[in-house]
Amino acid sequence: MQIARRLLREFWLPALVAVAWTVFNIYSTKSWDFKAIVNVFGPSFFLASWATGQFFRVQKQVGVEKNLTSIETRVTTLVERLEKHTTDFLGYATGGDSWASFRPMLPSRDTLELMLHNESKYPVFDVYAEAIDLDEPIEPDKGRLWTRHRFVLHSLFPNKGVMGAYRFDLKDKDRLKVNVFTRTRNNGSMPFRVERDSLIGRRPGRTGEPAGSSGVTAAGTRWR
């Protein structure tokens, strides 16, 4: 039944045009027979069917192209969303490219603290840090090297920090040179140095004030 409706939809117009043209020719000649009717109706119907068939073909092709474009757009959007969700899943599960860094602080006149802070989009996992005081006396020939002060943290979520991860006593010191090496689950080592050649005459910083404002500088280079 569906096929019959489709045939009727596509051929009613060619049939109507062919009938009209045949009637016009018969009345014009004033004489006609069955053979004349077939000779006029057949080519007329074929020509009209071909013309309307081209119209339906182009119409169908336009519809197919439109549907393909819509499908392509939806697939592209789906792939982008899938990639984003995959990146987010891996980021929240493993840490992704997140990184935690240390910030020097001077909570008091004789104390320097390093705060560990995560400014990344995802959490940071398995933080391991080692700090060494470069001014500590060493004797490599005797196997006496710098003392490694370790800091371990299981996880640190975005925009969170750990106050006082390291604390250094500045009392009776005229300078401080500290190297801190940090690594996480997904990233390699990052050297971080806090250095001040002369601490004489330093002013006490406000609680939570960055050390750079009181003369202590920090510099780091991220390695992978």
Image: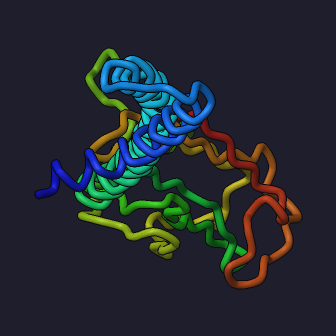
Q: Is residue 177 left or right of residue 8?
A: right
Residue 2 is left or right of residue 81, and the answer is left
The front one of 61 and 161 is 61
Residue 182 visible in rendering: no
Q: Residue at x 49, y 33 (%)?
A: 22
Residue at screen point 26% across, 24% down: 143
- 149 above or below 29? below
Q: Residue furthest left?
A: 1
* Quadrant assignment, res 147: top left
Q: Nearer the viewer, residue 85 or 103?
A: 85
- Is 164 or 90 nearer to us in this picture? 90
Residue 32, percent across and down? 44, 26
Looking at the image, which residue sits at the far front? 31
Task: Please state the horizontal and vertical placement of residue 192, each as a whole percent of the image.
Answer: 56, 42
Pinpoint residue 139: horizontal percent, then vertical percent: 38, 24
Q: Quadrant of the C terminus?
A: top left
- At a point 39% along the width and 17% down the height, the residue shown is 39
Residue at image position (51%, 58%) is 120
